[in-house]
Amino acid sequence: MHATEVLRGLRAVIDGAGPALRLGASDDDAPLPVPPGTAVVVTTSGSTGYPKSVVLSRSALIASVTATAERIGEGRWLLALPATYIAGVQVLVRSLMAGHEPALLSGSFTAGGFAALAATMRSRIGDTAVPTYTSLVPAQMQTLLDAEDAGTDTGLAGFAAVLVGGQALPPALAERAAAAGVRIVRTYGSSETAGGCVYDGVPLPGVRVRIADGEVQLTGPMLADGYLGDSERTAAAFVPDADGIRWYRTGDAGVLDDGVLRVTGRRDNVIVSGGVNISLDRVEQAVRALPGLAGAVVVPVPDERWGEASVVALDAAARAAHTDPLALVREAVGAELGAPARPRAVLPVDVIPVLPNGKPDRVALRALALRA
């Protein structure tokens, strides 16, 4: 769905006059009835790598927008993210709620296109300049900062705030942004929380964070109602406490330090690469289906550009079976799971290390990958 269509649908939803908007679902999916009060159903691969349709009410969207405005202010927003993702949805809703038309970046993301659009956003109400905002993933931020280093004024420093989410922001990238005068706000959240609800580690107004058995859990008025047509998954992800307050189980590990949240990683075998959740189990399945690669093991590694990536550990026999195993693996995984899921490299080992129970020693392999 094009951004202009999403914007039109969201305008009707926020005004209370339109039907629920369905985003991200395949045209072949059989439509399920949505609960009363639903504003948007966002279908996403989620932390498991399998599709789930998150049901968000109008009140959840508005609560998120209101809390964001209270924290960073309000104004006009530039959409540089897909409008069918929750982060893109909220960029549009924030502009609409503030009474401004959002600026829509069309086509593939480029530094030149972003700079040209940013230059058109300057406006005033009386003698007061209207603040501008945007939301990016780290890979986009790197593209823009690279352009700045090459002499292009991308307009980044002119934004009142640039929200960065979807994955952890590399410290070196944050330092480059600060040096360029960019006011970055790190966001943490998901479709289930109507987008980012923790900014720079601090919960937005109305949001509470707790750590239960090492897992980050969130509650607040912006929580989703659940998953469309999946009561079992809804019950597992949204759990009530003794007072009847619903908490969303993020699946992330983290700690609270004087009320500031620090996320330390995923609790399952999933990476977030360029803002896309990728199940390494599914990547491994695709690799192991290839001739001679049944013993391949996929492990995560940090990636300066995308946040996280994966490498494929192959023993000598597996590598000898193909002249270019990396090209083969990337083609197969890309065809089955999409380009963001493609492994970055092959990790060559003589033999795959195993645990006493015969399973691959993934900890040892990841340590090897980090040293490679």
Image (cartoon, rainbow, N blue to C red):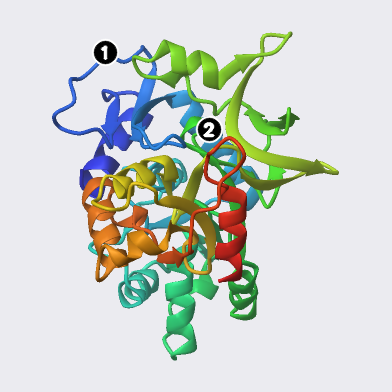
| Amino acid at the residue labelled 1 | Pro
Vertical comparison of 111 with 8: above or below: below
Q: Give, as a three-letter code, the residue at label 2.
A: Thr
Cα–Cα span, label 1 and label 2: 21 Å
Q: Quadrant location of the N terminus?
A: top left
At 54% across and 56% down in the image, what residue appears?
163
Q: Nearer the viewer, residue 91 or 30?
A: 30
Q: Quadrant of residue 274?
A: bottom left
Q: Say which label, 1 or 2, has the lower sequence index.
A: 1
Residue at the limit of the structure toward the right, as seen here: 258
- Assess disc 2: are there few (<14), some (14-19) or many (≥20) residues with their C-alpha within 10 Å of its C-alpha: many
Instruction: Name the residue at 51% across, 41% down.
Output: 269
- Mark 2, residue position: 193
Disc 1 + disc 2, Cβ < 8 Å = no
Q: Which mark is residue 308?
A: none
Can residue 207 be seen from the camera position used here?
Answer: no
Give the percent coordinates (x, y) of residue 368.
58, 63
Residue 216: percent from left, percent from top: 67, 34
Choose between 108 and 327: the one closer to the eye.
327
Q: Position of residue 103 (x, y in %)?
A: 34, 59
Mark 1: secondary structure: loop
**Image check: 305 left or right of 41?**
right
Q: Residues within 10 Å of mark 1 (few under 14, many from 20)?
A: few
Residue 147 in view (yes/no): yes
Secondary structure found at label 2: helix
Residue 33's disc is 1
